[in-house]
Every structure is written in C-alpha cells, then in structure tokens.
Amino acid sequence: MALDLSKVRERDALRSQREPYWQRIRPGCFLGYRPSAREGAGTWIARAYDEDQRRYRLKALGDFGTLPGKDRFAEARKEAEAFAVLVDSGGQTEAKIEKNMIGSRNVSACTTRSRRRLMNPMRSSVPIIRAAPGPSGQ
C-alpha cells in the first residue's frame, strides 16, 4: 500500500522515526515527512537528485505550523518542487540563467544538461578537439 502524505489522517497515524516517510512527486524529486516525537506538527524534507554529483540533495522545509493541517502538504510540495528545479539548474534560479548569454545563444533556451555544459565547458562529457595549426606561410 502506497503512503499518501497529502492526507492528514494518514500522517497522524505514522509512528515517529528518524528516517522520513517519502513520497515521490516526480522522477528525482521526493517529499519526506518526519512525525514529531512530541506533540505538534512533524517536519517536511525535500530530496532532489543532482545529476552532476550523482547523489541526492536534501533540504529541511520546516513544519508549516502556521498553516492548517490540510494545507501543509500542498505548501511543502511547492517548496520541494522549487528545490528540485534549483538542483536541476545547477544551483541557479531561472531568472539568473536568462541573463547569462554565451556568444549569441541564450542559455535559458537550452536543456539543463546542455546549459551546464555551455556555462562550464570543463564539465562537458564530450572531449574538446582542437584543430592542428596548418602550415604557416607556405
């Protein structure tokens, strides 16, 4: 049975443990919930896969204690998706990327992987081949 963290009743029934209960939002993006050992709201955690580092990045989102229980999942999900976009972009927000121009090509029109290569050619998995100089003056 899959866990649905959007339902308050299911979250309240979870027992307290160190490892969060995870729910997949989309490939590479997860939302975790850790119930409180004491009374009160549990905490939310975002997990996003970083292709460059080949590992997951984590971010504590807090408990969203000021919101009603039914709205906490939606807000935590928005924060987790925003974190995943940040990780996918290599740590730069889309607004910053749009300002970067490489040659005459706008970087924001590229995919995330090609954007990273354009912005940092040393990260490219494609070898750079330099042409040998031709005969000079002959």
Image (cartoon, helix red, strand yellow):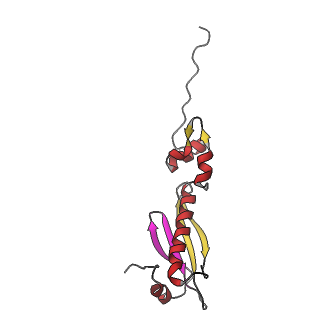
For residue 45, what is the image quadrant?
Answer: bottom right
What secondary structure prevails in the magenta region? strand
Residue shown at the point (37%, 81%) measured from the top left: 1
Judged from this view, the residue extending furthest toward the top is 138
Magenta segment range?
19-35
The reply to whether residue 133 is visible in this rendering is yes
In the rendered image, residue 33 lying in the magenta stretch gets the answer yes
Q: How many marks?
A: 0
Q: Position of residue 17 (x, y in %)?
A: 55, 84
Left or right, 1 with reference to 81: left
**Quarter holding the C terminus?**
top right
Q: Residue at x 60, y 38 (%)?
A: 102
Q: Is residue 82 above or below residue 112?
A: below
Q: Position of residue 122 (x, y in %)?
A: 60, 42
Figure quadrant of residue 131: top right
Residue at 48% over, 75% down: 22
**Residue 118 % position (x, y):** 57, 42
Question: Residue 32, percent across and down?
Answer: 52, 75
The quarter of the displayed image where residue 106 is located: top right
Relative horizontal placement of residue 19, taking residue 6 as reference (left or right): right
Residue 25 vertical position relative to residue 101 in the rendered view, above or below: below
